[in-house]
Image (tube, rainbow, N blue to C red):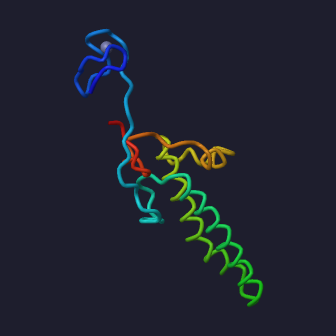
Amino acid sequence: MFCEECGKEVHDEAVVCVHCGCALKKSIVKTSPQKMFIAPFSFDGRIRRFEYGLSFIIMYISALSIGFFIGYTGMEEGVMYLLLIPVYWFMWAQGSKRCHDRGNSGWFQIIPFYSLWMFFADGELSDNEYGSNPKGLNYN
Ligand SMILES: [Zn+2]
């Protein structure tokens, strides 16, 4: 690549130009993004904001449907809690992966209002200790 300041050729991995000393900007390349909902009950890996948002809607609809189902059929309330286990499992798993996307431990989601932040905050670019960028964004 070439330095933007002096125009001389520099090494591709260089962060500073050896000719003029200015900082070289890192460019971002996009590779194919990760498919959504590939392991919805796993606590490993990373997911993007959009998948997290969808997960929240899915959880909400599932929990409501279970509630209506129990109310409508007049079943024991205990059955409802049993049916809600996979729903909450799913939401905690998805939450963990969103925390990972931001480079944090999955436990961060128990911080009050942190899940709200997870709807909007950008994930870390490139790979981190939890996996590769789910949008396929990496440093060149
Ligand atoms: Zn230069």
Eyeballing the image, is 65 above or below 10?
below
- Which quadrant, please, contains the C terminus? top left
**140 left or right of 58 in image:** left
Image height check: is 129 above or below 14? below
- Residue at 72% from the left image edge and 77% from the top image edge: 67
Residue at point 59% right, 48% down?
Answer: 109
Q: Residue furthest front?
A: 7
Vertical order, 15 against 51 (above or below): above
Left or right of residue 115, residue 76 in this image: right
Q: Position of residue 24 (x, y in %)?
A: 36, 21
Question: Which quarter of the figure has residue 22?
Answer: top left
Q: How many labels does the image show?
A: 0
Residue in front for this viewpoint, 94 or 11 = 11
> Dividing the image into 4 quarters, which one contains the N terminus?
top left
Of 128 and 136, which appears nearest the observer? Answer: 136
The residue shown at (39%, 37%) is 28
Percent from the top left, x then y, of residue 6?
Answer: 32, 13
Residue 45 percent location from the top left of the image: 41, 53
Is residue 37 placed above or below 98 in the rendered structure? below
Residue drawn at (26%, 12%) of the image: 18
Task: Give the farthest residue toward the bottom.
Answer: 73
Q: In which quarter of the image is residue 11?
A: top left
In the image, ligand 1 is in what quadrant?
top left
Relative horizontal placement of residue 9, taking residue 106 as reference (left or right) = left
**Left or right: residue 14 compared with residue 48:** left
The answer to which image quadrant residue 112 occupies is top right
Tell which of 118 and 50 is nearer to you: 50
